[in-house]
Image: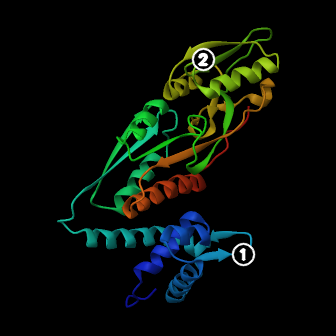
Amino acid sequence: MNSSMSLEVDAVRAFLMVADHLSFTRAADALGTTQGAVSVKLKRLEDRLGVRLIERTPRQVRLSAQGEIFMPSARDFLAAHERALAGLTMPRRRFRLGIASHVMGPELPLLLARLKSLDPALTVEVLLDTARALLDSFESGRLDAVIIRSDDDRRDGEILGPEHFGWYAAPGFEQRAGEPLRLAATSPCCAVRDVAARLLDRASIAWEEVFIGGTSAIAAALSAGLAVSAFPRRLAPADVVDVGEAFGLPPLPSLSLVLHSSLSDQKTKDTLRAITAAFREHRRSSSRPIAPL
């Protein structure tokens, strides 16, 4: 790209929406326009840059190699534009987000960075608590949005991605023949714990809880070799392995991470799109299976 070339903000925004959603349909919905308009803006940007940014087939939309390279610069360009518009006198806006304690994970830094670049006048308030406490605050209007798991609430919301589980333990964990499986678990009201216990009982596998705590405490217990746990793959420590197959444990069902919001103004919609994109982008860039034992 030569130094005299200028970029159109709307074209760059259209590219980022397609890149975030990997769908022209969802990008058009997010921008409040048509697929045709998004395609025209993207084509104009690609012609200006002289490279193809998006590879599109009847079955798939994905970033090209040049698109992957251009995306960070595109975000910086759009963020600089938003900061210029915000100016110094723009009133600050507050966004109150609740994240369930057993959901909060490595996506948070990317999410907060994305929100900062989206709106320089935005004050972000993040609350970590139990899903039930967050839903109560959400329903009473004290939170603008909440991120929980699908087992915490049955209402519809924006699906951020799947939550896969495995039976995790330290590589050196020993399960002695004839002894109950030593488990680490969250409180008895946890749906994942209940499902895991039911599956073990159905498989006639004896078990006993030897450690009870929150998500971070269980992660520490696994790394220390104290027990096995039905644990989210996304949050599993790097020094643990999936022992399910080696120990003959039953497969665990997957859940979903869900975003709920009751607000519909355009600024909040933009914020929610940034949260959704951050979760999905983190999944694409850092997803890694935990090696089985």
Could you tell me how far apart the alpha carbons at marks 2 and 1 are, in whole angstroms?
Answer: 49 Å
Amino acid type of the residue tagged 2 in the rendering: Leu
Relative to 176, 4 lies left or right: left
Q: Nearer the viewer, mark 2 or mark 1?
A: 1
Relative to 120, 128 lies left or right: right
Residue 226 numbered mark, or none: 2
Of residue 47 and residue 28, the one placed in the foreground of this image is: 28
Residue 282 numbered mark, or none: none
**Which residue is the site of mark 1?**
57
Residue 114 x/y as whole percent: 41, 58
Amino acid type of the residue tagged 1 in the rendering: Thr
Which residue of the protein is positioned furthest toward the front in this rendering? Answer: 140
Residue 174 x/y as whole percent: 71, 17
Q: Residue placed at 62% from the left, 27% from the top?
A: 191
Q: Are marks 2 and 1 in contact (CB under 8 Å)?
A: no
Label 1 secondary element: loop
Residue 149 x/y as whole percent: 57, 39
**Residue 28 higher or lower than 242, as above or below:** below
